[in-house]
Amino acid sequence: MNSKNTIEEVLQSLDKIQRAEPAPFLYTRIKGRMMRNEKSPFNIILHAFITPKFVLALTCIIIVINGYFLSNKIKERSAIVEKAQPIAVEYVHQSLNPYETTNDSPQ
Amino acid sequence: MVEKELIIELKRGDEAAFQALVSSRQNLVYNTVLGFLQNQEDAEDVTQDIFIKVFESIHQFKGDSSLTTWIYRIAVTSSFEFLRRKKRKKRFGFMSPLFGEQNEPTIEIADFYHPGIALDRRENASMLFKAIKKLPENQQIAFLLNKVEGLSYQDVSKVMNTSLSAVESLIHRAKINLREILKNLYNL
């Protein structure tokens, strides 16, 4: 058999092809899959919330809240520092540092 | 059930209409998908997906073409989507052991034997299917719809949303390419 005949034979091999059939009970299997795919109320709510808009809005809210608490914390700290400043100054004046020679120390 | 009635009932979400649709078009969808995927299990899976897709998106069907043509289009698109997904999975297959995902075999079955082919033509047809896989997508679509599904050039052009002459040219080029591919496969 020459090569041209072989190729032509192969090309004609689909000529009398019969339609293939799926396994029985396809409809039942489709229905089963549809039921499995059906979303529970929890999933529906979850899917409604997990949208780019929602995630973006949530991120913005978190950033704003963080900023608010951070600025409060900074204010609080500066207030404490302000209050503690005179005490610290007084404390420093009263403290005795052996390496420091001051005029008050006995000669 | 007449097609128009069937569409109306499907749009209403009628289960009996859906059942009628599945039983009347299941061989058409399965056979088309099987030609592209060349794997019976995958074809079963994709066929189920296609019917679910048809049922869920029937309200998008405008009636510009027949329902059968529309289903053919979904079948073709879904088949190639599946093949692309499978290819992607295979490409990143080396990562699967890292994540413990070892359920799916990544090795493709070498020879495909279409169940609708007589025994004496099985080997030749298997070789032809192997060659068809190497064709460009649009040539595959035109050739398989014509040869495996038995659609006329006119019907193929409707499914592919192209002109009759374009289909003729696609099938002509497909045959030329197939001859070349087969020559290489047989080392002739």
Image (spheres, coloured by chain):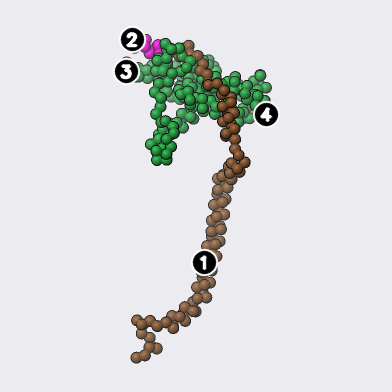
Q: Is residue B13 magenta?
A: no
Q: Mark 1 — on which chain does it sit?
A: A
Looking at the picture, tell me which residue is in the foreground, A59 or B17.
B17
What is the three-letter code of the residue carrying label 1? Ile
What is the three-letter code of the residue carrying label 2? Asn
Q: Which mark is residue B187?
A: 3
Q: Mark 3 — on which chain does it sit?
A: B
- Seen in the picture, residue B157 relative to A76 is either above or below; the reply is above
User: Which chain is painted in green?
Assistant: B
Mark 3 near mark 1, Cβ–Cβ under 8 Å? Answer: no
Q: For the residue carrying disc 1, how many other residues have a C-alpha within 10 Å: few (<14), some (14-19), or many (20+)?
A: few
Q: For the residue carrying disc 2, how many other residues have a C-alpha within 10 Å: few (<14), some (14-19), or many (20+)?
A: few
Give how far across and how far down residue B11 sits, in percent. Answer: 65, 28
Per the image, label 2 sits on a secondary structure element best described as: loop
User: Which chain is painted in brown?
Assistant: A
The magenta segment is A3-11
Q: Which residue is mark 4?
A: B12
Instruction: Name the residue at 40% across, 11% down.
Output: A9
Per the image, label 3 sits on a secondary structure element best described as: loop
For marks 4 and 3 on the same chain, the one whose residue lies earlier in the sequence: 4
